[in-house]
């Protein structure tokens, strides 16, 4: 009998690891997730929000296990499917960068790659993972196809990546627990118990409609209160601007390009050194740059502001639910023109932030089964989701503290006209 390892999780209790799951967790590239915080800079607002992607990955696998076992017992998926979907859930976040969402737009600008593309490279190219897959007869291509939503089973695809997947079912209550924000609490037990196969993936019976609605409302509130909190977003932007400055210095650029250049990224994954690319490395670079005094006074000031919570001030903070993304784009352009014509400030002194974040996926919202009839939740007459717009829209203008008064005066003048 294979030796089992039990890890106590603050959300789910004991999580059992045996066989391929234990061996994956023991790899260096997975242990790296212990050193990647789940919510970068959320601790500047919610001091307890220092949990990691390691615990989230385990939690996602645990939820996948609960649902997949029922699907297997019901004859909807095979025993091999049960294993591979749990592996996919366990590895769904393996491609996240240090400081996660802070740096991912930066890498996207550099290489046109995001966490999903990096995850595919790690799953197919990391030497330790390859050994584990070969030992247990797991196809890395099968895992990747589920993560990309391209496997032949819509049920497996949606269990790992959909509006109501195991990722969201874990991170909403987990992030609520660690931030202390009650809005993220969902009826996890009811949703997990009643998730069921539909005509084209996962669905929820009408008796769990209230739980499904509260899940969507929790997402809406968590976007406002945590994920896109004005202060948290401001520091994520500030870190990107700091690293943009770092790329101007050969000594710092060489370290970053080890993991953020096309050649360096692939080489570090293939030679098994990608596990070193974590929050600690970025934090160390910030401290090193200040210690060695190798930055310009302006760049040094940005790093000091980042480390000592003296960063951007949000002088415009407009948040609303909206039916399309045009409002955000128009407002973004208005703010850019205003700054360019009425001030002499340029980035990184001033930054326009605009984003329309989906509350639900238009055309792919969770489906509800009622008396044999399957519909999207937006089509269910008794559902309040029919009246909630699909996006929460953020339009913000950030400035460094020393320019706040100048920009506020410009804004007041603009509003009077």
Image (cartoon, grey):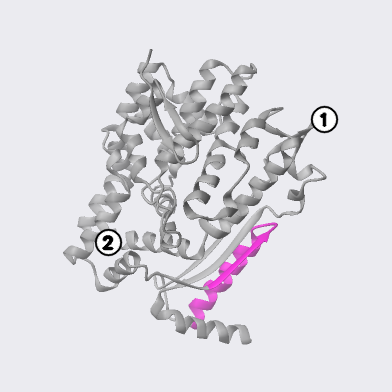
What is the span of residues highlighted in magenta in the rendered image? Answer: 316-342
Relative horizontal placement of residue 390, taking residue 93 as reference (left or right): right
Name the mark on residue 342. Answer: none
Q: Which residue is mark 1?
A: 371
Q: Main secondary structure of the magenta part?
A: helix
| Quadrant where the C terminus is found in the figure | bottom right
C-alpha separation, residue under disc 1 versus residue under disc 2:
63 Å
In the rendered image, residue 274, in percent from the top left (x then y), is placed at: 30, 39
In the rendered image, residue 132, in percent from the top left (x then y), is placed at: 35, 22
Residue 74 higher or lower than 339, as above or below = above
Q: Nearer the viewer, mark 1 or mark 2?
A: 1
Question: Residue 323 colored magenta?
Answer: yes
Name the residue located 21 percent from the left edge and 57 percent from the top edge: 250
Q: Nearer the viewer, residue 61 or 240?
A: 61
The reply to whether residue 48 is in sight is: yes
Name the mark on residue 248. Answer: 2
| Quadrant where the N terminus is found in the figure | top left
Residue 122, quarter of the rendered image: top left
Residue 286, quarter of the rendered image: bottom left
Q: Across the whole image, how many numbered discs are drawn on residues? A: 2
In the rendered image, residue 154, in percent from the top left (x then y), is placed at: 62, 28
């Amino acid at each position: 009998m294979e030796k089992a390892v039990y890890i106590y999780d603050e959300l789910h209790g004991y999580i059992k690891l045996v066989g391929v799951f234990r061996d994956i967790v023991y790899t260096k590239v997975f242990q790296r997730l212990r050193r990647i915080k789940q919510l970068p800079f959320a601790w500047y607002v919610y001091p307890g929000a220092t949990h990691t992607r390691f615990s989230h990955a385990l939690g996602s696998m645990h939820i996948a296990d609960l649902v997949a076992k029922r699907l297997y017992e019901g004859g909807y998926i095979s025993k091999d499917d049960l294993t591979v979907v749990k592996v996919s859930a366990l590895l769904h976040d393996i491609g996240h960068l240090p400081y996660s969402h802070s740096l991912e737009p930066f890498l996207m600008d550099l290489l046109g790659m995001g966490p999903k593309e990096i995850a595919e490279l790690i799953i197919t190219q990391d030497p330790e993972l390859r050994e584990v897959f070969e030992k247990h007869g797991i196809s890395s291509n099968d895992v990747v196809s589920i993560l990309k939503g391209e496997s032949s089973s819509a049920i497996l695809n949606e269990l790992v990546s959909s509006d109501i997947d195991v990722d969201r079912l874990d991170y909403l209550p987990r992030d609520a627990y660690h931030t202390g924000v009650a809005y993220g609490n969902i009826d996890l037990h009811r949703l997990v118990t009643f998730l069921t196969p539909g005509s084209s993936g996962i669905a929820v019976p009408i008796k769990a409609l209230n739980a499904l609605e509260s899940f969507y409302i929790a997402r809406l509130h968590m976007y406002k209160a945590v994920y896109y909190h004005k202060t948290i977003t401001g520091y994520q932007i500030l870190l990107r601007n700091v690293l943009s400055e770092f790329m101007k210095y050969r000594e710092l650029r060489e370290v970053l390009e080890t993991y953020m250049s096309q050649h360096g990224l692939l080489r570090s994954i293939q030679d098994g050194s990608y596990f070193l690319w974590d929050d600690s490395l970025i934090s160390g670079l910030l401290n090193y740059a200040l210690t060695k005094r190798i930055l310009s006074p302006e760049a040094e000031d940005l790093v000091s502001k980042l480390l000592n919570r003296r960063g951007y001030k949000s002088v415009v903070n407009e948040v609303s639910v909206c039916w399309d993304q045009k409002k955000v784009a128009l407002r973004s352009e208005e703010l850019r023109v205003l700054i360019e014509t009425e001030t002499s400030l340029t980035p990184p002194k001033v930054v326009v932030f605009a984003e329309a974040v989906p509350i639900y996926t238009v055309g792919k919202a969770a489906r509800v089964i009622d008396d044999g009839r399957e519909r999207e939740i937006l089509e269910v007459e008794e559902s309040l989701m029919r009246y909630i717009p699909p996006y929460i829209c953020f339009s913000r203008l950030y400035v460094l503290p020393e320019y706040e008064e100048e920009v506020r005066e410009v804004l007041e003048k603009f509003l009077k006209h």
